[in-house]
Image: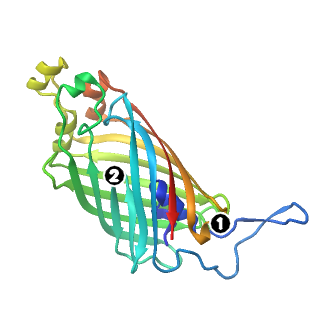
Amino acid sequence: MSFTKTSLFIAASAAIAGQPLMAQTYQDTGETAEVSGPAERPETVFDGDWVSVGIGAAYSPSYDGSDDYVVSVLPIVQGSVGGVDFNPRPGGLAVDFIPDAEEGPGLDLGVAARIRRSRASQIKDPVVKSLGKLDTAIEVGPTAGISLPALLNPYDSLSFNVDMRWDVAGAHDGMVIDPSVTYFTPLSRGAVASLTLGAEYADDSYADYYFSVDAAGSTVSGLPQFQADGGFTKASATMLLGYDLDGDATNGGLALVGIGGYSRMLGDAKNTPLTSIRGDADQWFVAVGVGYTF
């Protein structure tokens, strides 16, 4: 498997598996000695077909740019069947059709999809709520990436990924591009950590749908009129920690994951009165979950 494909909480529980011990503790002396890894890779639950399923709870802004926070349930699935990998995305899933290389750089190429429900539900701000609910967008498009293993230790990796998606449900009718870079490293046989830096770029149609306030909306809400144009809408940083409950992720089973993230609204996504007057450009995100790998 490619450990750089981790993205959300169940991805981390999957990524733990297959990582050899980075340090061996000797029971008789209490000393810890660094080892370069076993001469022969041991079998793991990820050899062949495998699936991870999980569920978690997230505490995040009510909509992009909101200063009100809501709790959401996150059902997640990840796995590899017949050489085709499927990996979680925020609100969606990505499928990679390129088999992973045994060693050296790895390539990803496939399709990503996302359900976007910003301002479609859980609107807590009464002024924003007066503008009415938006439709749910379903975004689909290609995804591509490359991963570079063994940078600072034998088991870490640095990956670069880009998702490009178009709304096919007739909501915002626009295009979104999500570039990201992730550094992943195991902390022990049963624990992993990753740091992801990302951004979101959207076209005029997307920006107008989510961030503009027209004359009718201004009359209803009292907010000033605003015409939003496309561009970068946010930049983000996300830290993920995962731990296998029996201390050995190579055998699958249950794992716990925690995520903390921060994003900053940019451009017209920041300047819109939905953010600048009724919300906040600083956006925080936390999530906890449990997953099972078999």
- The quadrant holding residue 32 is bottom right
Q: With respect to residue 48, does 32 lie above or below?
A: above
**Side (left or right) of 258 relative to 87:** right
Please indicate whether residue 167 sits to the left or right of residue 40 in the image: left
**Circle number at residue 248:** 1
Q: Residue at x 70, y 77 (%)?
A: 38
Dot 2 surroundings within 10 Å: few (below 14), some, or many (20 or more)? Answer: some
Q: Amino acid at mark 2?
A: Gly
The label number, if any, that marks residue 109 in the structure image: none
Q: Position of residue 251 (x, y in %)?
A: 60, 71
The location of residue 147, given as percent across then percent down, is: 47, 66
In the image, residue 65 sits, relative to residue 81, either above or below, namely: above
Q: Is residue 116 above or below residue 92?
A: above
Helix, strand or loop for disc 2: loop
Vertical arrangement, residue 214 with respect to residue 106, above or below: above
- Of the numbered discs 1 and 2, the one sitting upstream in the chain is 2
Q: Furthest residue to the right?
A: 29
Q: Residue at x 44, y 43 (%)?
A: 58
Task: Depth check: give the residue in front, 58 or 165.
Answer: 58
Residue at 22% of width from left, 33% of height from top? Answer: 211
Q: Residue placed at 37% from the left, 46% from the top?
A: 199
Q: Which residue is mark 2?
A: 91
Q: In the image as oriented, which residue stretches furthest toward the top? A: 222
* Side of 175 where 270 appears, left or right: right
Task: Answer few, some or many: residues within 10 Å of disc 1's Cα (few below 14, many 20 plus, some between 14 and 19).
Answer: many
C-alpha separation, residue under disc 1 versus residue under disc 2? 29 Å
**Res 89 quadrant in image:** bottom left
* Corner quadrant of residue 64: top left
Horizontal relation, residue 2 to residue 207: left or right: right
Q: Amino acid at mark 1?
A: Asp
- Residues 271 and 190: in front is 190
